[in-house]
Image (tube, rainbow, N blue to C red):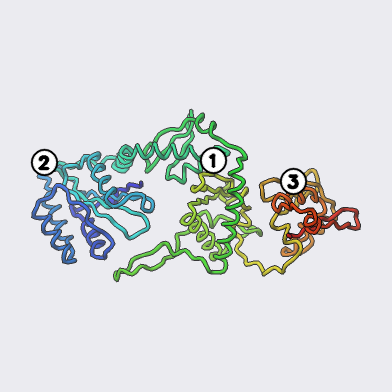
Amino acid sequence: MIVKKLNDVSGGGFPGARYNEKKIADGVATLMAMENVSEALRHNVETLHRFGLDASAEVERYMKENSKTYGNTKTTRFQFHVSASVKGRAMSPEELTDFARELMEGMGYARQPYFVYAHHDTGNNHVHILSTRIKPNGYAISDHQDRRRLNECANRILSPDIKKDIDRILGYDYETEGQFANIVKTHGYKIEKSLDGYRLFKCGGNAGNIAIGDILNRITKNSPKRKDRATQLRAIIRKYKGEIAEGKCQNVDNVKVSKGKKRKPVKAKLNTDIRKILDNHGKPLSEENCQRIQTLIDVLKTKFGIDISFQKDKDGRVRGYSIIDHAEKIAFDGSKVMKLSELIDFAIKPQRKPSPLDVYRDLFTVEVGKDSRGNYMLINVKDGSTYRKPISPRQYAWYNGVKDDEREDVGLTIAATMFSEEILTEYLIRYPIHNHQERIKGMAVVKHRNGNSLVSLKKC
């Protein structure tokens, strides 16, 4: 829930009446409630709406007539105009109207004339509340720290929901405090470290505290569910990256409504962090690539309930990202699913010709690097296991000396000579062979000149 007090207006007018009534005329709003108003006004407004006519003049005239100060106050800020919105369709217009009534009571406006309008011109259900600050005795209701008080009042009303949110958050699978903090943020809360845990804030108001013990006691490490889901997420992301790159998948969920009530797609609002990502050459991403990343983020969120957020270094550059999988309630360090460099790369790969190496691509991926211990190769098996072995300077030079589109094949070839036992074990787990003759047909061992054996596999 996000509650906002709209800008104060001086001069004793109620421009909120024109704003909300115009939304009704455009077919994107409904008048849900008229509280503490005369029967005459109620009849006039309902009649005008029935014939599709603008009732703003009637509403504003009534509000002005019921905002007499009698010289007791010098303020001319009569209008009280508030919006309350939720993500998507989390609350219906009727539920939001009930919330509006509770909010007005909590803010001291229960006996004031007010109107509740439900708007449906965006992807999020929201209501606008229009009232007057001037009480029948001519005095104004104090607007001191209205914005803070509004959010604290909203949190009090929603406190049962906040408790449910906290219980839900603690039910996620996470490995670090940082991942826990990311889960909290995706639920619409701000988080701040306190002496005994973390303090939560929502809409600017205090939403409670979670003890550090409750957080640490629920940390999990290397759960089988996590490994399996990481593999699934990797496949999902690659699938939609390919469709976005080919123009087959576009974000059209965001729409605007024209005066003719036609829904037209609009470009998704870009996450500002995306512009802080650098490509493999240390340069900012193109505008086209930024939009593709945003489309990917939106598709993953709307189709699968997957949130992606980026982590920045002290210079403000994005160095990593996190994944919150709400469907399975798991938080990931993004690099455990897919490297950032691969996530942002939408280059369409040329169609690969069938190759004997294809069977390895289904089993593992290869990484080659150099550190204080020398040159090394890693194979990351699809079940989550990782194996490391040193490689020779000659192998390292061979891998890094070929073109980018040839490097994977070279890596697979080297891996097949060095990790033959690990690859064979994984192959037999993935494709169990019960007949001894088929087992012999399914593999062959080839001797290389350097004495190493290359296990050649094929699916039977």
Answer whether residue 431 is visible to the viewer in this image: yes
Task: State yes or no: discs 1 and 3 in contact (Cβ < 8 Å).
Answer: no
Report the amino acid beneath label 1. Asp
For the residue pair 312 and 126, the one nearer the viewer reads as 126
Q: Looking at the image, tell me whether mark 1 or mark 2 is earlier in sequence order.
A: 2
Question: Callout 2, which amino acid?
Answer: Asn
Q: Please name the residue that numbered disc 2 is placed on.
A: 137
Circle 2: is it few (<14), some (14-19), or many (20+) Cα within 10 Å? few
Is residue 1 shown left or right of residue 251? left
Residue 156: quarter of image: top left
The structure residue drawn at horizontal position 38% and vertical position 39%, both measured from the top left corner, is 162
- Disc 1 and disc 3: Cα gap in Å? 25 Å
Q: Are marks 1 and 2 in contact (CB under 8 Å)?
A: no
Residue picked out by circle 3: 387
User: Residue flagged by tag 3: what amino acid is it?
Assistant: Tyr
Is 357 above or below relative to 170? Answer: below
- The numbered disc on residue 173 is 1
Q: Quick one: quadrant of the C terminus?
A: bottom right
Q: Residues within 10 Å of mark 3 (few under 14, many from 20)?
A: few
Residue 85, compared with residue 122, is above or below; it is: above
32 is higher (above) or lower (below) than 70: below
Looking at the rendered structure, the secondary structure element under dot 1 is loop
Which image quadrant for residue 202? Answer: top left
In contact (CB < 8 Å): disc 2 and disc 3: no
Going from N to C along the chain, the mark reached first, 1 or 3, is 1
Q: Is residue 34 left or right of residue 307?
A: left
